[in-house]
Amino acid sequence: MDSPSQNTSLQHLQNDEKRIVRVLELAGGVMEELANPGGPRKELVNNHCSEFMQLIKDIQVTLREEIKSACEYRPFEKCDYVPRIANELCCKKLEYVISKIDEMKKAIEGYDDAA
């Protein structure tokens, strides 16, 4: 039987999964807006980018907390290398996505400044 802390952990990870889906929806919305023949609507792009960045930060916080707590749940287990590395890779991927979104925001600002 699962412990209450494991259920809570699963709920946190399920919420993160929902956040990731929303992040992808936002990224798609920004891409559609940038492809708009009439030009992107600055307010919409800014709102999507802001929500995207907040969700990415929330995901990172939750994943870091879950990684820490996973180690606390299994203090006597001999090896947690594989899950730890997988989680670190996920964090690195999220950092990469954040950097690319920052680049997109700068490009959008440059586009708006040129217009």
Image (spheres, helix red, strand yellow):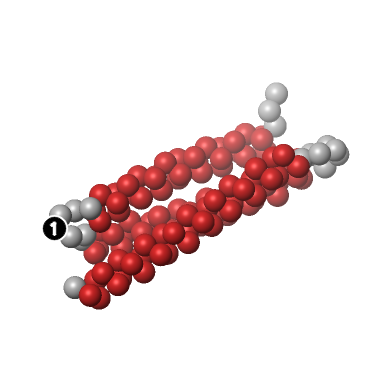
According to the picture, the residue beneath numbered tag 1 turns out to be: 38
In this view, the residue farthest toward the left is: 38
The front one of 51 and 11 is: 51
Which quadrant would residue 46 be assigned to in this image? Answer: bottom left
The residue drawn where x is 36% and y is 50% is: 27
The front one of 21 and 115 is: 115
Position of residue 45 in the picture relative to residue 57 (left or right):
left
Quarter of the image for the C terminus: give it: bottom left
> Is 5 placed above or below 34 here?
above
Q: Amino acid at mark 1?
A: Gly
The residue drawn where x is 30% and y is 53% is: 30
Which quadrant would residue 3 be assigned to in this image? Answer: top right
The front one of 45 and 10 is: 45
Q: Position of residue 22 (x, y in %)?
A: 39, 45
Q: Position of residue 104 (x, y in %)?
A: 37, 62
Q: Residues within 10 Å of mark 1 (few under 14, many from 20)?
A: few
Quarter of the image for the N terminus: give it: top right
